[in-house]
Image (cartoon, helix red, strand yellow):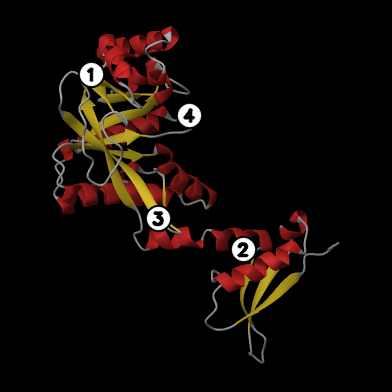
Amino acid sequence: MITEAPFVKVAVTAAAQPEAGAVARVLEQVAAALTAAECTRVRVAWIMAGNDSQQAIRVAPTLAELRHEVAHRWFFRLLDEGGLYMHFQPIVWLQRPEVLAHEALVRATHEGRELSGAEIVAVAAATQLVVPLDARTRIRAIEQFATSGLRSKVFVNFQPSTIYNPRYCLRTTFTALERTGVPPEQVVFEVVESEDVADVAHLRRIIDLYRAHGLGIAMDDFGVGYSTHERLLRLQLDYVKLDKSLCRDVATNGAAQDVIAGILRVAGEAGCRVIAEGIETVVQQTRLRELGVELGQGYLYARPAAAPQVTWPV
């Protein structure tokens, strides 16, 4: 057992960087000889091979942290090199065959496989890169929409927890709108928040700043978790998106129908429109229409794609 916190010395050539595959394999070999607890204490010193002075070119905090960094180095490069791109999914009127908007959904490719938005956000959280990911996603969504040829509004996701000083943090977003020539009235920023927004006043400041620039505001996944009718009234939203779980069994689930009916009443008082997410069948569409939901989004109409083709079900 290791009782101190020693260094593991790894010799590398001038061309070999810690993220290189061969060096990564050396780290795994070292880790295999240690316990999990030891990996969190042992430090790694990189030594330039053939250097008479044996001068360490880099010291990592711990073996465990370096392995984590090496495993996710591709994600750092992806953000730095502009590897994010968007797929768009239409939001349609349920009463007539017209498209209101397209939601921009982030994608990336790694090791020959396309990553979903949820996978990308999970890696960003693991590497503490949610803030730069959020900023780059907003900018990329605006840029790609500007060149997509789509003639609609565009819904762009953002997480309010990543924005500390709204006027400073959102400056690049407004610059992107000016640079691309996308009219502000075509853009709706969609609040995506996996945890409770403790400072509703802060969220309201962000919303007010967006509104001052002529942008619309939507709230995602409404009807479950932390969303409340009181919050809907306080934030003065333009759109609320019903959580997919409410729409999944809407044709047969009386409780879900009651929740949706309640949201529709409050939304009417607040002057905002309701969008049903996750619509996959004509039966779901019909029941939502009967309840009074105006807008919908889901595989029934189109899957996310660079240039989605909308299907209008009978």
The quadrant the C terminus occupies is top left
C-alpha separation, residue under disc 2 versus residue under disc 1: 51 Å
Q: Identify whether 153 is placed above or below 247.
A: below
Q: Write the residue at 27% across / 14% down.
A: 286
Contact flag, marks 2 and 4 (Cβ < 8 Å) = no
Checking the image for residue 229, the label placed there is none
Neighbor class of circle 1 (other Cα within 10 Å; few <14, some 14-19, many 20+) is some
C-alpha separation, residue under disc 1 versus residue under disc 4: 27 Å
Disc 4 element:
loop
Depth check, mark 1 against mark 4: the one in front is 1
Where does label 2 land, which residue? 66
C-alpha separation, residue under disc 2 versus residue under disc 4: 32 Å
Disc 3 element:
strand
Q: Identify whether 237 is placed above or below 22.
A: above
Disc 1 element:
loop
Q: Earlier in the sequence, mark 3 or mark 1?
A: 3
Left/right of residue 247 with respect to residue 59 in the rendered view:
left
Where does label 3 land, which residue? 109
Depth check, mark 3 against mark 2: the one in front is 3
- Amino acid under label 3? Thr
Q: Earlier in the sequence, mark 2 or mark 1?
A: 2
Q: Nearer the viewer, residue 306 or 261?
A: 306
